[in-house]
Amino acid sequence: MQRRKTPQRASGAATAVKPMQALSAPFGSTALQRIVRLWRRKRIGRLLRHVLAWSVAALYAAPLLWLLVASLQPVGQPPPRTLAWFPQGVAWSNYLEIFRVAPLGRQIGNSLLVSVAGALITLLTASWAGFAMSRLPASSRRWLVGLALLLMLIPSSAVWLPRYVLFSGMGLLDSYAALVAPALLGTRSLLALMYYWSFHRISCEIYDSASLDGAGVWALWRRIALPLARPTTLAVAVLAFTHYWSDFVDPLLFLKSTQRFTIAVGLRMLQQMDATNWPLLMAAVVVMVAPVLVLYLLLQIILDKDASLHLRSSRLWRDAPIHLQLSAGSRTKEERR
Amino acid sequence: MAAPFVFGALLLVVLPAFLSFALAFVQYDALSPPTWRGIENFAVIFRREVFWIALRNTLVFAFSAAPLQALGALMIALLLHPERRGVRVHRAAVYLTSVLPDVAYALIWLWLLNPLYGPINLTLAWLGLPTPAWLVDPRTALASLVIVAAVRVGEGMLLLIAARRTAPDSIYDAAQIDGADRLRTFWHITLPWLAPWLLLLLIRDLVMAIHSSLTPVILMTGGGPGYATTLLPFLMYEEAFTHLRLGEAAAMMVVVFALIGPPIGLAGWLTRRWWREDAA
């Protein structure tokens, strides 16, 4: 809603500059020409773009700012009904209070455990799968990549019901194993494919010479492939960690005992406890969001440092079957050449 | 070395996919062993009015959220694709909305859309505009969910920026020499160049809109007011875990699969076609 408002404002500003239209021309055509002519005058266009870009960024940053402001309102008074930021003062104590009101510390610990375990297992399985894809003969490689692509097309949220039945049959309900299980297939097959893409660039000669020196498959993977794909490892680790940290549906379905709750379901617990205590709820949201934002910004900075990686980093981002299909498509093109 | 991956894929995706089809034909409450029920599950859900309401809501939701999302991604991508000073900051601001955890995102919007104290309504009131009750009003509840989902354009934006970069500068130079203005350049060059990506993005947004709707519905509306925001995934969740009718929930899942299967198939078919043409 906010986003769609800005372009209208822009064209409004452009039309405001021009005088009345001649009545004989077909409706709107002269107006259009004028706008186009204004666009063509580069300076105005550039200024307009600049203003637009900043307002879009501001609109997108606004919710986060409002979140922070809401989390710092004093508890116990009705929320302010003005646009003034802190009419009742700033309550930093909210951030201590939530740890008293809710078992947030414990939930953060649980989340950390699940996320770190999930990320570590993912690094192993995804890099193994990617390595296998890059080293296998073309026929079995096509089969594996095809499987990964197929998995991308089935959102994991589409299979939670049968997974529930499966886990209850295996006695995994109410255990962290049920939450970390997706790490077996690299959390998202996108992550395995990311490893495949970066391993794929390593030339065969390096492997061959190492093999001649007597290195086995595992040594090739650990000594050569992994060190050369360090940025990918970083990105995969961040993506996997935030996946488990943010996961809401899995713990909601598979966890029963509240002392095992992760922070995602903990937030819902807090919401149900006292739905009108906005400052505390928003403070808890800030606590949950902060590590994710920090990790993504760090990742961005590190990947940006290596300019050659920058283009690829846009492809790496979260769960996009299409990113993947595109890249896989262009890859097969290269192979054919 | 791919063994864990293949094993995980079979155990966690392929097997469950088949299992959900099997479940749709049994009566099962997760406690006593399942009993065969044939197509009775489908007959039962088709007879219930709430199923049709949820189906309609789901279609309305997906077919309004996804196009808006794709359109927004296109506009922002075109705005933010040239490398300029500060453009990283702009992109990061837009992108960060998409990496927020779903729970946090839903709760933030629950606060923003609060009819009395929410910043959005306070701003609207300050501007002298009408202040709808958003999620509380059955007439605007579903529209509010659409807005919340449609604003998240980060991934689409990155995809389209990357796609726009693949367009060679030479076409644009040629267009400029021929005297094409910006509008024509957009209409005859940029849009056709981006069309395949846009279509795939649209299809992907459609599928994801349906599947990621469970979290916001649970946290923001609980399916209400009335049944105004009861979408199929939420109804499925209720059916399975509140009423323990797993068979009927699975039948609904089959319906959802039937809904999203064709677009997914279309996406796969289109990609393969386009890139084969490219390679030839």
Image (tube, coloured by chain):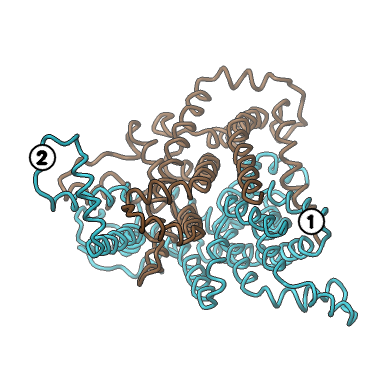
Which amino acid type corresponds to the residue marked 2 in the rendered image?
Ala
Left or right placement of residue B128 versus residue A295 in this view: left
Left or right placement of residue A62 versus residue A29 in this view: right
Q: Residue B263's spot in the image, x, y percent?
A: 58, 36
Indicate which disc residue A141 carries. 1
Q: Residue B60's spot in the image, x, y percent?
A: 44, 32
Left or right placement of residue A322 versus residue A53 in this view: right
Q: Which residue matches tag 2?
A: A22
Q: Residue B6's spot in the image, x, y percent?
A: 79, 53
Q: Which chain is brown?
A: B
Which amino acid type corresponds to the residue marked 1 in the rendered image?
Arg
In the image, A304 versus B197, the foreground residue is B197
Q: Residue B67's spot in the image, x, y percent?
A: 43, 40
Image quadrant in which you'd find residue A125: bottom right
Helix, strand or loop at disc 1? helix
Q: Name the residue: 13% across, 53% down.
A: A17
Image quadrant in which you'd find residue B270: top right
In the image, A41 versus A291, the foreground residue is A41
Q: Name the residue: 35% across, 51% down.
A: B111
Q: Name the residue: 49% across, 60% down.
A: B168
In primary-sequence order, the first of circles 2 and 1 is 2
